[in-house]
Amino acid sequence: MLDKKVVELLNQQVNKEFYSAYLYLDFSNFYYDQGLDGFGNWYKIQAQEERDHAMLFVQYLQNNGEKVELEAIDKPGIVLESAKAVLGEGLKHEQYVTSLIHNIYDAAYSIKDFRTMQFLDWFVKEQGEEETNAENLVKKFELFGDDPKSLYMLDSELGARVYSAPSLTL
Ligand code: FEO
């Protein structure tokens, strides 16, 4: 049996991860509409990763005999102003998700829930990587986004991203 507060936060995280998937699918659609198919591909795969994250939280709750409570997923709430601005929003969103993961970790830590802390370790590392990726996208766009040829090459690079399943299995 897990602690009630920890279970509540884990359940909320299922919703947050599905929301992230929904948000990134919105980003992806935005880029496809702009003709930046590589950016569209990059965020479509990101959306897929977020669904994986949600399912890992579901699986962890179920592995511990806890009930999964699915809530409504909000409409993506970010105004997509420009190809560059969306990348900044992506970085901000990842920083927010990191704070959520840390918050659950904090709750688990305070009651010596070592099992949940160990589960969350993977997410702590993953968030570090996702923030770095999002930061790199922002930097690359700042460097190359204003030059059509460079932007074309950057878009091609992002178009080469392929999906791979999460390294965490439960
Ligand atoms: Fe699952 Fe990118 O946070």
Image (tube, helix red, strand yellow):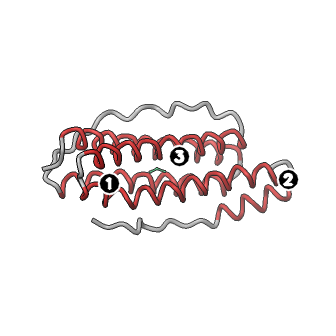
**Disc 3 within 8 angstroms of ligand 1 (CB):** yes
Label 3 environment density (alpha carbons within 10 Å; few <14, some 14–19, many ≥20): many
Report the number of discs.
3
Q: Which residue is drawn at 28% across and 45% down?
A: 110
Above or below for 81 versus 38: above
Task: Kindly identify which numbered label has been placed on residue 47.
Answer: none
- Indicate the secondary structure of the residue bearing disc 3: helix
- In the picture, the disc for residue 55 is 1
Between the C-alphas of marks 1 and 2, the distance is 39 Å
Using a 10 Å C-alpha cutoff, classify the residue at mark 2 as few (fewer than 14 neighbours), some (14 to 19) or many (20 or more). few
Give the labeled residue for mark 2. Answer: 148
User: Which residue is disc 3 drawn over?
Assistant: 94
Instruction: Give the secondary structure at mark 1.
Output: helix
Q: Residue at x 32, y 67 (%)?
A: 169
Verify CB contact (< 8 Å) between mark 1 and mark 3: no
Query: In terms of depth relative to the viewer, which is nearer, 120 or 83?
Result: 120
Q: Say which of marks 2 and 3 sits in front.
A: 3
Q: Is residue 131 left or right of residue 154?
A: left
Question: Which amino acid type is shown beneath numbered disc 2?
Answer: Pro
CB under 8 Å between discs 1 and 2: no
Q: Please give the name of the residue rendered at 75% of the width and 60% of the height, measured from the top-left corner.
A: 154
Distance between the Cα atoms at labels 1 and 3? Answer: 18 Å
Measured as percent of width and height from the top left, residue 140 is found at 75, 55
Give me the residue at 13% from left, 52% from top: 65
> Image quadrant of residue 72?
top left
Whichever of labels 2 and 3 marks the residue nearer the N terminus, that label is 3
Q: Which of marks 1 and 2 is nearer the N terminus?
A: 1
Looking at the figure, which quarter contains the C terminus? bottom left
Q: Residue 132, image x and y in percent?
A: 60, 56
